[in-house]
Image: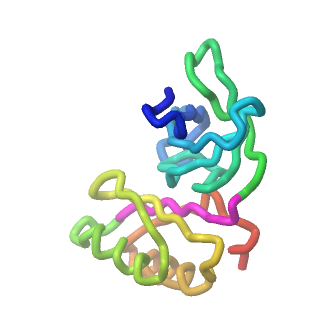
Amino acid sequence: MITQDEQSVKILFRFYSEVLDEETVETMWATIVDKSKGLYKLENIPFYAPLVASDDIVFAEFDDQEQMLTYRKTIENSGNSTIQIVLMDLSKDINQIRDLFKELGCVSEKVNEGYFVMEIPSTIDYKNIKEKLDELESQEIIAYAEPCLAEGHWL
């Protein structure tokens, strides 16, 4: 699918989701880098897709069975990381938790009242964020996964 401005396309990702515990399909917007080579730059924070983050350059090609551009592999990692967060204590406000991380420099996308994904930009030190994640998890407020932890964020 190509938008009216012809600069962005939707790419299909098919994978097994650990979060959902099932085979899953997700689509993400991407900017065309080099259409003839099948190169695209991801614009979204992935909700479930593992091993990719926004601003990654990926190779995708039209798949006859899927009838759309389909992810094949990551060509260049952006250095951004993706964290999946599940709210365990439903008495807490998910937006307040998102705001805690926003103050630390992380943007997030809320999927629903119990789940959001967060991006850690390549320029941000992961140490303080990881400490906050661990603190909230030890208090049984959240559970989290690191499906795409960039090398620059390894501790």
Residue furthest out toward the front: 5
Can you tell which quarter of the image residue 82 is in?
bottom right
Q: Is residue 108 above or below residue 36?
A: below
- Which residue corresponds to the image point at 34% horizontal and 76% vertical from the top-left? 99
- Residue 54 locus on image (x, y percent): 58, 55
What's the magenta bit mostly, secondary-structure-wise?
strand
- Which residue corresponds to the image point at 68% horizontal and 43% vertical from the top-left? 33
Residue furthest out toward the top: 64
Question: Closer to the camera, 139 or 72?
Answer: 72
Q: Is residue 35 above or below residue 74?
A: above
Question: Closer to the camera, 147 or 61?
Answer: 61
- Which residue corresponds to the image point at 50% horizontal and 51% vertical from the top-left? 44
- Residue segment shown in magenta: 78-87
Residue 59 part of the magenta segment: no
- Residue 97 locus on image (x, y percent): 34, 74
Residue 86 part of the magenta segment: yes
- Residue 67 locus on image (x, y percent): 56, 16
Judging from the image, the colouring scheme is: rainbow
- Residue 154 locus on image (x, y percent): 72, 74
For the C terminus, the image quarter is: bottom right
129 displayed left or right of 75:
left
